[in-house]
Amino acid sequence: MAINDYDADATELLETYDFLMKYIIIGEAGTGKSCLLHHFTHNSFKEHSQHTIGVEFSSRTVKLGEKRIKLQLWDTAGQERFRSVTRSYYRGAAGAILVYDITSRASFANLSRWLADARALGSPNLVVVLVGNKSDREDEREVEWAEASRWAADHDVHFLETSSLTGDNVEAPFLLCARSILLSIESGALDPEKAGSGVSYGDRALRRVNSSSRLSFGSLSVGRRNRGSTRLKLKDLVPGTSNSRCC
């Protein structure tokens, strides 16, 4: 191997990023949380997936504009017997991916409990994205998109549907959540240096902070609602994607 090639590999190992964000993936057992996360991190469907026991951890670094964000992803078990264990991992989370199965009304009916726990234990600025998984099974649907959209609006969370089998929209919830958090940082509503924010600066961001009193996210800025929350269009996250099913 040439010396230059070795240096390039070494540089890749010393990964740098602007922000580190903690996410939790929550919802009833059997909704496809682990499969959704696996497709996001490995770009493939997870065959023969078993129920998560307790909590499993993974990570991925994504890029939004000029910002590199490392996501800490905590996949939690959906069974009631693990609830006391998994809830301890909610603390200080900056983002929550709340998953239900569009073919299971029971998984949708319990969303309020999951959301209440996440908001009670997560960051005060917790960003929540509601995800209706298994959109590839339209003929078995028990929860209509319009109903879930209304629930999301009533509870002030983002919403979209995905398929962890086909990969349709699997990246969108994670990017939507990250972008909302970045906007909160830019507006001053969230301070990454504050304990319990679920966000911390990476080496790249710290270097910029030393030379600038304000981080600029450029094209990340969008209109804000009067209540201070942000509604983002999916087409702004993934070029060529319609936002007709995202709110």
Image (cartoon, rainbow, N blue to C red):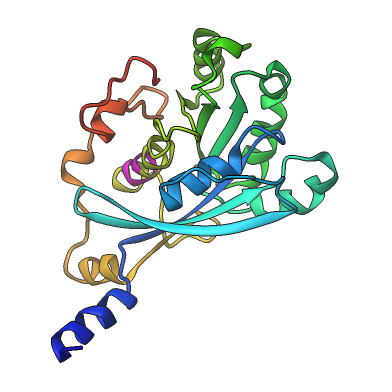
Q: Is residue 136 above or below residue 192?
A: above
Q: Give the dominant element type of the magenta stretch: helix, strand or loop.
A: helix
**Picture quadrant where residue 17 is located:** bottom left
Q: Is residue 180 magenta?
A: yes
Q: Is residue 209 above or below residue 110?
A: below
Q: Is residue 227 left or right of residue 34?
A: left
Residue located farthest toward the right when viewing the structure as drawn: 81
Nearest the eye: 229 or 158:
158
The residue at 73%/20% (across/down) is: 106
x%, y% of residue 214? Answer: 22, 56
Q: Is residue 66 magenta?
A: no
Q: Is residue 95 visible?
A: no
Q: Is residue 80 left or right of residue 61?
A: right
Nearest the eye: 138 or 228:
138
x%, y% of residue 244? Answer: 33, 14
The residue at 66%/54% (across/down) is: 89
Nearest the eye: 153 or 139:
139
x%, y% of residue 188? Answer: 34, 47
Q: Is residue 145 left or right of residue 55?
A: left
Query: What range is drawn magenta here?
Result: 179-183
The residue at 40%/30% (across/down) is: 168
Q: Is residue 164 visible?
A: yes
Tell me the quadrant of the picture where the C terminus can be found: top left
The residue at 78%/54% (across/down) is: 85
Marks counted in the figure total 0
Q: Is residue 106 left or right of residue 3?
A: right
Q: Is residue 197 above or below residue 106?
A: below
Residue located farthest toward the bottom when viewing the structure as drawn: 3
